[in-house]
Image: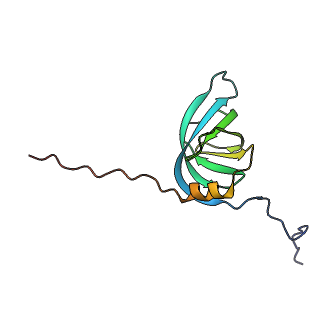
Amino acid sequence: MRHALTRVGDHFSRRNYYRRDANCQAGLIYRCVDSPDFANASVWISNISEGGALFLVEGLFEPIEELYVLLPGVRAKIPSKVIRQGDFIVAVEFDTVLASALVDRIAAYEPRRAKPAQAPSM
């Protein structure tokens, strides 16, 4: 006998907003649980939506208690809360919903390419 999985309603996705893949730099201003001081971290955006983002981080192992996000093209610090934190990721939810046009623009950014080094002339 096979058992059917149960779902309620037609809308069973837990996501409120469509995620867009992204590949650009952002910044975090954060305070860890046992620290009175804020610190900065440069991070990469893996994906972003109007409601939150997934950041790739390096060396951020302490649990974050308070967080502000700095997105490219946005002059304001965006208050956010950590939804999930791992050794190399931080998933956040923005306190206010971002405009779709802004999210689309951030998702379209390309990382800056370094200019190839030129051999010194003799």
Residue projecting furthest to the left: 122
Image quarter hosting the N terminus = bottom right
In this view, the residue in front, 30 or 107, is: 107
Decide if residue 13 is in sight here: yes
- In this view of the protein, can residue 61 be seen by the observer? no
* Relative side of 8 to 122, left or right: right
Asked whether 62 or 5 is in front, the reply is: 62
Residue in the picture at 28% in, 52% down:
116
Give the x, y percent position of residue 25.
52, 47
- In the visual, does 102 lie left or right of 17? left
- Say if 4 sits above or below 60 in the image: below
Q: Which colour assignment does the render follow? A: rainbow
Reply above or below: 38 against 68. above
Residue 23 position within the rendered picture, expressed as x and y whole percent measured from the top left? 52, 55
- Residue occupying the point 83% across, 65% down: 12
- Determine the residue located farthest toward the top in the rendered image: 36
Q: Position of residue 119 (x, y in %)?
A: 18, 49
Tally of numbered tags = 0
Who is closer to the viewer here, 26 or 98? 98
- Residue at 66 percent across and 29 percent down: it is 32
Image coordinates for residue 35, horizontal then vertical, percent: 66, 23
State the residue in front, 14 or 67: 67
Residue 10 vs 32, above or below: the answer is below
Quarter of the image for residue 92 reads top right
